Amino acid sequence: MSASAQGFRRASRISAIQLSEIAQLSERAAALRAAGKDVVALSTGEPDFPTPPHVVEAAHQAALAGQTGYTATLGTPALRAAIAAEAGVSPAEVIVSTGAKQVLANAMLASLDPGDEVIMPAPYWTSYSDIVAMAGGSPVVVPCDMAQGFKLTPGQLQAAITPRSRWVMLNAPSNPSGAIYTPAEQAALAEVLRAHPQVMVLVDEIYAHLSYQPFTSFAEAAPDLKDRMLIVNGVSKAYAMTGWRIGWGIGPADMIRAMGAVQGQVTSGACSVSQAAALAALTGDQALLITRLEEMRQRRDRVVAALNAIEGIRCPAPDGAFYVFPDIRGAMAKGGFDTDADFCAALLDQQGLAIVPGRAFGLPGHARLSFAYAKEEIEAGLARIAAFVAAF
Ligand code: PMP
């Protein structure tokens, strides 16, 4: 018996799961910085704005008022009621969790048996496939390239469904592509799902407030699918509250109860003070959302124009969120790179710019740049890519 067999051994459930490519990149960038290198990172999905002061104040007051104990497992009555009121559902159809990420994990742990399939259009947010795998499911990745706007077509959805399909995971506005489904596109996907009642639909709308085009929730587009639909949202992106760790799910009460059973054994419920902060964010002044969206739109336009000016890079303008996901295959070929990961690694080593290769999102040949950064950093990053490609 080898020594390691007597000590720690990974469960087969997580044998294929590594630190995410985004986290690995951030670590490499931090190591280069520590070694004295000048590094610019456009790699993470975190607003550079601070949490609004009235939200911080609400948390402060909640803590002073003694809201420091465990809350109800599914969330404080006040926060669940506010979320339910906004969505037009009852509080029993709402669960508050430690970030939208935990909502996703709760849903998968509560619903998947080994071998159950989860359909995910690529590019998808990196964590989707790992969360599904961790819960014992099998991700079924459907490539949706730039020519189709990075969106799943009804034909692709139909072709991906098998008797083992349990979920299709949609995300709009998308991380990383920014794509938003139009009402007609949503209706066409819903039509396919109607014929397959065993398939549930998870719709991650965490970037809904960051839409540069009209945005319609899937819940409005297909109200008849409500009994098998989970809408995921949270305060991280819209209100610049990533560290507070508050997200929520809206779904049928039996699904929410099952997710609550998981959550009760994993975290007991979300942080009390953070829930008070999230309530203040949702019920307070929303004017900041508009000014921040305008700021993001300007950054988006600048980044798209600058990238399209680089030979070998083709960058569509995203409809929402704060990422661009350009096709870099022309530049890769010019520089002699076989993979997007090699391209991004060389970009970091030679120019000190961290961006994330498309393969982390299930769609190679692309790269994701976040523009949730200060203008100076964005400009520095754009100059570095231009210099990198010009040197080929
Ligand atoms: N969904 C998507 C599409 C995301 O991009 C993220 C954050 N990167 C999350 C969910 C998770 O957000 P949080 O856990 O901070 O609420």
Image: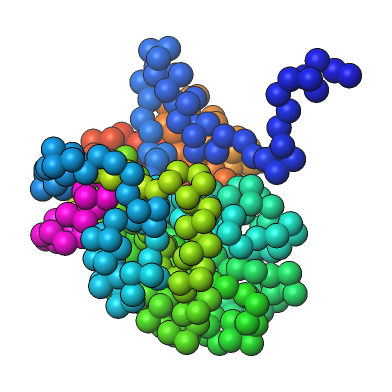
On-image quarter of the N terminus: top right
Whole-percent x and y of residue 187?
Answer: 48, 85
Quick one: 3 or 212, which is closer to the camera? 3
- The answer, for residue 346, to whether it is visible in the render is yes
**Nearer-the-camera pick, 292 or 367:** 292
Above or below for 108 versus 349: below
Residue at the (40%, 61%) spot, across then down = 95
Please report the bounds of the magenta region as a residue range.
274-291
| 252 vs 191, nearest the viewer | 252
Q: Main secondary structure of the magenta part?
A: helix
Image coordinates of residue 125 in percent, x first then y, are 50, 53
From the viewer's perspective, tell me whether residue 97 is left or right of residue 83: right
- Above or below, 343 against 361 in this view is above
Looking at the rendering, which quadrant does residue 238 occupy?
bottom left
Q: Give the percent coordinates (x, y) of residue 254.
A: 51, 71
Q: Is residue 390 magenta?
A: no
> Which corner quadrant of the image does residue 213 belong to?
bottom left
Query: Residue 387: percent from the left, percent from the top?
Result: 41, 34
Which residue does the image show at 74% across and 40% down from the upper left? 12
Q: Quadrant of residue 141?
A: bottom right
**Residue 122 seen in this snapshot:** no
Query: Number of numbered discs present?
Result: 0
> Is residue 387 found left or right of 144 in the rendered image?
left
Give 271 or 372, whichever is nearer the viewer. Answer: 271
11 horizontally vs 157: left or right? right
